[in-house]
Every structure is written in structure tokens, then in C-alpha cells.
Amino acid sequence: MGWVKDKIRGTALERILRRMLGRPAGDPDDTNSDYDQQTIDVMKRVLRRDSSCIDIGAHEGDVLRHMVEIAPNGKHHAFEALPHLAAALREQFPGVNVHDEAVSDTGGKAEFNYVENAPSYSGLRKRIYDRPDPQITTIQVKVVALDDVIPSDQPIAFIKIDIEGGEYHALKGAAKTIGKWKPVMVFEASGKSTGQYGVTPAEMYGLVTQTLGYDLTTMRRWMTKAPSFTLETFSHNWDHGPVFYFMAVPIAN
């Protein structure tokens, strides 16, 4: 039934169905669904059939599925730390290089917080959860830096990162890959998630705009040609919202 979910994702019909099931329109799942649809729309604009992508925090493959469909001749990588989800991705996407590893700025092993009643909230550290009573089990996972895994000669056109707060460290660990290929990137960031890793909005903004050389915006802003974020507007949003999913676009030389 995955194709049905894809057809109605982000539409009024999906919101109606969520209300019928007891999920209000403001439910986090509605917002996440909207972000997924925006990600798909961006990929349709920036990817070619042979573009290669990286999905960090692939979860059940909702975005990965579209990466493969939009760029069927690309060499894609998916990272998912939860073993059962990684195994399902490997079976569902035999042409994708699936890594059952968490992503950060260094390699090794670490404890991973598996939120059993809301797996998409799982991460290397606990975050401020939008759902009540998270049931958390700690598991051991392998951790890698992207620069140590992605072949240096493989062009990368697009990176999506949704790992519940670990995005800053994942970007740091991918600095060489990003600097060489300048992919378009979308990622989650906020005080509730990334901030729980000890990261400030100024550090995240500086990493993206100064160290990596990108404009920091949102997918909707980019698609409508609205101005990018300044540090002031990004910092305010970090603390107050409403946006928690961002887009990084290489600054034209």
C-alpha cells in the first residue's frame, strides 16, 4: 500500500484521513508528510536520471523510494541505524547501498536511543519529543563519518539528513564530500533536536554558510525564490519555529 500513501501524501485527503483516525491537522506526522513532499518536489527539480544521492536516516524508505524513481541510474546510499529497518530497506531496495550505521563526525560505536513507540524519533542522543511517553530502549550501533564511507570519486548530487538532532555532526563528518561535489542538501534542525547535541543556531548557521559555503533557506523559500535566512532569522526560527526542516544550496561562484 506504499503507493497509496505516496499518492495522497501532503494532500487535503491525507489530512482528512488523519482527523478521522484521531490525528489533528497539526500532528507532527502531517508536518513531516509535507516536508517529504517538498523534498520530492526539490529532487524532481535538481536531479538527473544518473544523479547519485545519500539518504541519512532513511527509516522506512519514503524519500529513498523517490530518489530511486527520479534517478534510477544513480548510485544511491541509505543510512539507517535501526537494524530491522535497515534490513527491510536492503530487501526493498536491492540496488541501493544500505548502511546499518548511525552517522556523525567520527567513527566508532555508540549507544543509540531506539524510541519503540515512535521509531522516527530515534537517535544517538535523546531529544525533546513531540509525543508523550516515549518508550526508549538503548542499543549499540556502529557510527561512521560520511567522508570515510562514500568513495571520493563518486559524485553526489543530493543529501537528505533526518537523524533527530545529529545533523550538525553528520555535516561536519561529510565536509570533504560536500566540498568536492557541492550537493543540494535538506536537513532537520531545531533547538528541540539539534540543540540537544550542544549545538547553537550560530554554530549550525556558520557551518552551513561559512565553512561549507551554502545559502541556508527552506525548500518552500527556494522553490518560490524567497530570500535565504540570515543568522538572526534562522536563530529566531531555531527557538520558536515554525520551520524545522531546511535546505542548503551551493553559493554560485
Image (cartoon, grey):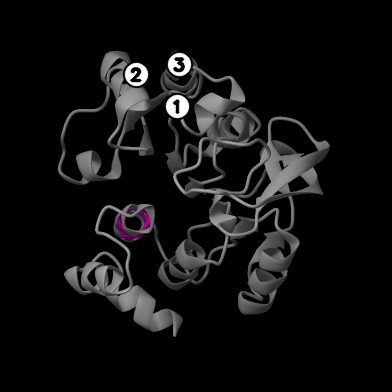
Q: What's the amino acid at mark 3? A: Gly
Front position in the image: 213 or 171: 171
Marks 2/1: CA–CA distance: 9 Å
Task: Identify the main secondary structure in magenta.
Answer: helix
Q: Earlier in the sequence, mark 2 or mark 1?
A: 1
Q: What's the amino acid at mark 2? A: Ser
Residue carrying label 2: 235
Q: Quadrant of residue 45?
A: bottom left
Residue carrying label 3: 206
Marks 1/3: CA–CA distance: 16 Å
Q: Position of residue 227 (x, y in %)?
A: 18, 28
Residue lying at 26% horizontally and 64% vertically, measured from the top left? 10
Residue carrying label 1: 191
Relative to 46, 82 lies left or right: right
Region in magenta: 32-37
Q: Earlier in the sequence, mark 3 or mark 2?
A: 3
Residue lying at 37% horizontally and 76% vertically, measured from the top left? 5
Query: How many marks overall?
Result: 3
